[in-house]
Amino acid sequence: MDIITYNEKVFSPFLSKEEIDGIVGGLATQINADYSDIEEDVVLVSILDGSFIFMADLVRKLTFQFEVEFVKIRSYNGFESEGEIELILDLHKDIKGKHIIVIEDIVDTGLTIEKFIEQLQALNPNSVKVCSLLSKPDVHNDIINIDYVGKEIPPVFVIGYGLDIDGKGRNHHGIYQLEV
Ligand code: IMP
């Protein structure tokens, strides 16, 4: 992996394709163990855009039966309406009585996922769990419970494997960290 640049910002290698594959495999093993005997419907809800590559890799490692859904969320972290979210793309299925696994790329402050789970709970699912490839515990201070965490990372900005900077950089196989 080489150093890459976006808008004059320098990013250095953080996680290789092989390391990510191992992390996704580990998450799939845990989820398969927890859901293989569940009789009710299971729905994996991927939060776009960042989780699309992670979701595509994860679902192909899962061995039980499930449906998929995609949502798109606009969050207002750091603005006046801090912590508010708007669903730009909403669920298309009735999730009442179903088991939901929310698939997120990275949990930073945790506000997006916290508010989204509140909205999901109002729809009376059987259960809601969260799976995030990456988590920054020093930022969110465990305000939410992440059931399946791929890797805890320090409070650095990362791109690649679906994660972006100003919409770019999602296509890299590995994950890169912003040099400060
Ligand atoms: P939160 O509400 O602060 O947890 O924000 C979560 C969202 O912010 C993620 O789904 C990402 O879209 C974005 N995000 C947070 N940290 C990073 C990062 O290091 N790189 C790229 N996107 C990030």
Image: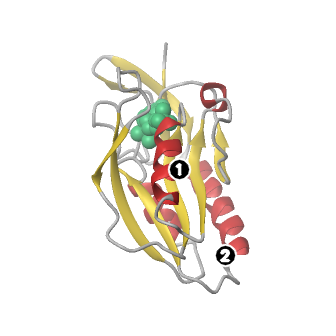
Q: Residue at x 58, y 24 (%)?
A: 155
Q: Residue at x 60, y 39 (%)?
A: 135
Q: Nearer the viewer, residue 94 or 12?
A: 94
What's the mark number on residue 138? none
Residue wearing tag 2: 35
Check disc 1: other Cα within 10 Å, few if <14, some if 14-19, many if 20+: some
Residue 12 visible in rendering:
yes
Element on which disc 2 rests: helix
Q: Amino acid at mark 2?
A: Tyr
Q: In the image, ligand 1 is in what quadrant?
A: top left
Q: Residue at x 43, y 52 (%)?
A: 51
Mark 1 C-beta to ligand 1 under 8 Å: no
Report the mark closest to the observer, 1 or 2: 2
Observer able to see residue 159: no
Q: What separation in Å lies between label 1 and label 2 (alpha carbons)?
A: 27 Å
Place of residue 173 in the rendered image (x, y in percent of width and height, measured from the top left): 44, 48
Way the structure is coloured = secondary structure
Return the residue at label 1.
17
Compare marks 1 and 2 and give the one earlier in the sequence. Answer: 1
Q: Quadrant of residue 32?
A: bottom right
In the displayed structure, would residue 65 be above or below residue 163? below
- On screen, residue 136 above or below 88: above
Would residue 137 appear left or right of 170 to someone viewing this image? right
Residue type indicated by callout 1: Lys
In-image side of 88 versus 13 (left or right): left
Q: Nearer the viewer, residue 54 or 86?
A: 86
**Within 10 angstroms of label 2, few (less than 14), some, or many (20 or more) residues?**
some
Q: Position of residue 20 (x, y in %)?
A: 57, 51
Element class at badge 1: helix
- Answer yes or no: disc 2 within 8 Å of ligand 1: no
Q: Please name whichever residue, 156 or 95, is drawn nearer the observer in this view of the structure.
A: 95
How many marks do you count on the picture? 2
